[in-house]
Amino acid sequence: MIALARQYARGLFWLTLGYFLILEAAMVAAIFYWPKFRDNTPALAKLIPFQSLQDLLTAVQQSGYWPYFAIQQWFKGCSLFGLAAIAFMGSGIIAREADQRTAEFLFSRPVSRRTILRVRTAVLAFAILVPVYLSSISAIWFSRAVDEWLPWKATLLASSYIACFLLMLIAATVLISVLSTHQLRAGVIVVGIVLLSFAQYLIQGIDQWSLFATIDVWTFMKIGAGEFPYFRAGCFLGASVGMLALAEKLLERRTW
């Protein structure tokens, strides 16, 4: 198992590093833009057409730096960059073997299909989620450069919540990859679904039914106030477990 994990991790290393650097660069840029954003909030409020973005400005006016950082780091950065990383790195987790006709060689090893899927999924989750925590923790120190302060507990809880959300997207990608014969199909499908959900989030009246409504500014403001959304996080984890269990069963039955 260790050799299997090491082999798969080697293939993801540079992609993971690039993903982390992009996430970190976007976060640092957002932090250093904060003073200018804060000083121009009243003027920006008049230019924003979307209710969801107006809610952000309202939250910033009420609570200052925390909602601004939450939207920049977790709502925008981790969800969208994380989605791209999941699609790029996870789409071929099984489908690549079918696409390149190497599935028979992979599954001829004295290791069960279930074990291979679990090890690869664990490595993928590690590659996606660890940069989320590292980037968020580094923001605690970067924020001091603009005379702001992020609480350790709230930052880690918010990172854990978005990690649960991303884990659900990972599970969905793995499930579709098990069903696919083309290595990019799973990523394209998941990206398409999530982008449609984001477009839905920008339309007032149906925005509350969007996936992004579960990770919006008000959710992170509650986390900052000490109210962790355990039910939603549990739903994310439950959906993840369900999709991964289904993926295992389908992989066991699949012929190559």
Image: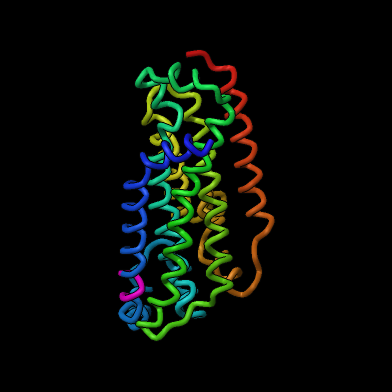
Majority secondary structure in the magenta region: helix
Q: Does 41 appear above or below 28?
A: below
Q: Position of residue 230 (x, y in %)?
A: 68, 58
Q: Is residue 228 visible?
A: yes
List x then y, in percent, for residue 28: 33, 69
Question: Closest to the observer: 22 or 212?
Answer: 22
Give me the residue at 57% from left, 29% from top: 247
Q: Residue at x 49, y 30 (%)?
A: 176
The residue closer to the viewer here, 165 or 251, is 251
Residue at x-position 37% and y-position 78% = 41
Q: Is residue 227 left or right of residue 23?
A: right
In percent of the image, x 58 and y 24: which residue is there? 112
- Magenta residues span 29-33
Position of 132 relative to 180 (above/below): below
Figure colour scheme: rainbow
Say which quarter of the image contains residue 9: top left
State the residue lying farthest toward the right: 231
